[in-house]
Amino acid sequence: MKYNRSMYTGSYSAEDFVFFWGHTPAADGKITKACFSQWWLCDFNDDGIDFCCAEQYMMYHKALAFSDEEYAKKILGSRDQKEIKGFGRKIRNFDEAVWNDVKSGIVIKGNMLKFSQNPKLKEFLISTGDKILVEASPYDKIWGIGMEASAAGITDPGKWKGENLLGFALMEVRDMLR
């Protein structure tokens, strides 16, 4: 992965970041930072296979990585993000070391497809400029930072409780789309 937490030392200004968490669309239909969520519903296609969200893409490819055709089919058959995530947790023959080797590439490709095939999302992502994108989920220490956006120390990446892999993956996608 091109970006990681160790690249950012010291404290930054809040304006240097885009903190996101949640996937609920705005009532007025405008694109907001909620579109950065893996759970954001928007259709995209990869080699003839339709996906409803980046979470579905990730979990489908997780199932394929461990040769679990049954769960791959279940994942593709659902449009419910919570159900998709649950299926992903049941994938058989899971090996954490293997997953750690492939997960970032899968998420980068899935988001590249999502943002490149949805022009309004692409425009919104590019509009973030060079800001550091941060999934401010207090519950996720892998894809997010394990802290909410209002937490003390949020502008100091050294104080984050998580890795922010999703934020960094989105930054990489943004670079490729420019």
Image (cartoon, rainbow, N blue to C red):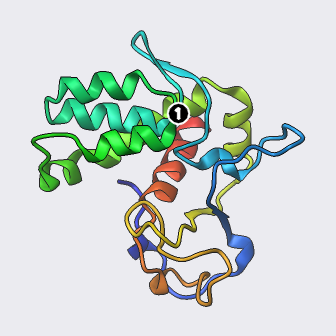
Whether residue 101 sits left or right of residue 47 in the image: it is left
Q: Is residue 100 left or right of residue 117?
A: left
x, y (%) of residue 143? 42, 60
Q: In the displayed structure, does residue 81 sit left or right of residue 127?
A: left
Total residue callouts: 1
Position of residue 103 measured from the top left corner of the image (x, y, whole percent): 29, 47
Q: Position of residue 160 (x, y in %)?
A: 47, 80
Q: Is residue 48 above or below residue 134?
A: above
Residue at 24% x, 34% y is 63
Image quadrant for the C terminus?
top right
Please state which amino acid type lies under the numbered disc 1. Answer: Cys
**As displayed, is residue 16 above or below residue 70?**
below
- Label 1 packing within 10 angstroms: few (<14), some (14-19), many (20+): many
Asked where in the image residue 92 lies, by quadrant, the reply is top left
> What residue is rendered at 31% in x and 42% in y?
88
Write the residue at 68% across / 71% down.
16
Quadrant showing the N terminus? bottom left
Q: Residue at x 21, y 24 (%)?
A: 70
Q: Which residue is mark 1?
A: 53
Which of the two residues, 82 or 115, is positioned nearer the viewer here? Answer: 82
Compare residues 59 and 19 and report the one nearer the observer: 59
Dot 1 lies on which element?
A: loop
